[in-house]
Amino acid sequence: MHFESALLVASLLLLLSVLAWKIAGRLGIPALLLFLGLGMLAGSDGPGGIYFDDAQLAQAVGIVALVLILFAGGLETRWSAVRPALGGALLLSTLGVLLSALVVALFAVWLLHASLLDGLLLGALISATDAAAVFSVLAARNLRLSSQLLPLLELESGTNDPMAVFLTLGLIRLLSEPETPPLSILLLFVQQMGIGLALGLVIGGLAIWLIGRLHLDVEGLYRVLTIALALFTYAVTALLGGSGFLAVYLVGLLLGNSRVEGIERIGRFHNSLAWLMQIAMFLILGLLVFPSRLPAVALAGVLITLVSVFVARPLAVLLALLPLRRMPLREKLFVAWVGLRGAVPIVLATFPLLAGLPRAGLLFDLVFFVVLASVLLQGTTVSLVARWLGVARPALASVSDAPAAEASPSASD
């Protein structure tokens, strides 16, 4: 394809994605469903006929997109508002993710006759939820969440990705290197979270100091600087064996809550950039999948989705939030229902492909199907469930133009 032709196709897909977001808002469904659909239509099995099967490129695009989306989410998170929900969010993003993965794993072992490690890998891949995609649906229906739900879901969506990434990488190591001691996975968790937390705090503090003292004459250079800081944070943390996603989110959180001059304008820029990254990520992931292979996993995908939605996620949420005795049951049930999947599971599903695991292709197709089914089932009923449980009320004004993507409290995984 000539460069001009590729540019034309890319611009048309971006334009159609913006129109799809408008349609999704009116229909009350997460926009990610239509973004993925556009990618599938443009792909080799669709009328677009664009052949794309480069999992490594898709993974690279997905990681860069998630880094910038998480950074934007951190910038827009108000610490004073979410601080009371910190304990519950951390429980959901660690214990909740682990419990959900375990329940799905046990079912997958029975359904697919898989080994326990294969089942755990599948559970880990789909354990990252896109709770923040709910916000766009509620905004489209002019609803707002009550009580402590909003900050709880904001923090969960920004902090559950590192746990899912850790589980995925740890299980891939156990599957590809059977001689690996299981205890080393626990050490990997401590290493990833510890280094991610430490570097996030250190780089965040240095970023505040640097931006506050540079006094650049051109305002646009601050945008370039913060993009560089986000990418640098992820890269150096990952190279040192830490969780780059956790570090990036923390840097964004520290910057967004600092007194750096012009941080609001920087935040608005990164919000727009997060939208671009979201669309690019979903389109390329849609291109990567071959829809003709999905019918073969449809039955297993439906059953895994039902177990995940009606058993694994509710059980994980109710157990993880047991310490929050003052939180009403109806709010916990809503948190359980809004655990729909987004882009992060699909990005994570490229890791087994690149690692050359025997059942990696089946895992990728299953994960993609579960994401679609989850969005269709949960994403289209969020406002209905919110009203039924009595956890939402009419908004005074339209809320948030933030991306409905994985892992961003304004949005992302």
Image (spheres, grey):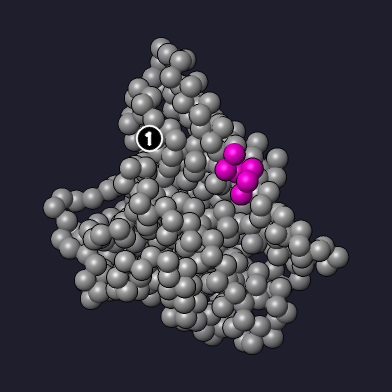
Q: 225 or 80: which is nearer to us?
A: 80
Q: Position of residue 120 (x, y in %)?
A: 65, 72
The reply, left or right, for residue 119 in relation to residue 22 is right
Farthest residue toward the right?
179
Q: Is residue 283 above or below residue 123?
A: above
Q: Main secondary structure of the magenta part?
A: helix
Q: Position of residue 123 (x, y in %)?
A: 59, 71
**How would you rate the neighbour count of disc 1 (Cα within 10 Å): few for under 14, some for 14-19, many for 20 or more?**
some
Q: Residue at x 64, y 40 (%)?
A: 237
Q: Answer whether residue 315 is visible to the viewer in this image.
A: yes
The reply, left or right, for residue 332 in relation to residue 412 is left
Q: What residue sits right under mark 1 in the picture?
A: 257
The reply, left or right, for residue 401 in relation to residue 116 is left
Where on the picture, by quarter, is residue 85?
Answer: bottom left
Q: Is residue 321 above or below residue 184?
A: below
Residue type at mark 1? Asn
Q: Secondary structure at mark 1?
A: loop
Q: Answer whether residue 339 is visible to the viewer in this image.
A: no
Q: Residue at x 65, y 61 (%)?
A: 168
Magenta-colored stretch includes residue 197: yes
Q: Residue at x 59, y 83 (%)?
A: 107
Q: Residue at x 82, y 62 (%)?
A: 180
Where on the picture, by quarter, is residue 104?
Answer: bottom right
Q: Is residue 252 above or below residue 411?
A: above
Read off the magenta span. 193-198
Where on the picture, by quarter, is residue 30?
Answer: bottom left
Q: Position of residue 263 (x, y in %)?
A: 36, 29
Magenta-colored stretch includes residue 293: no
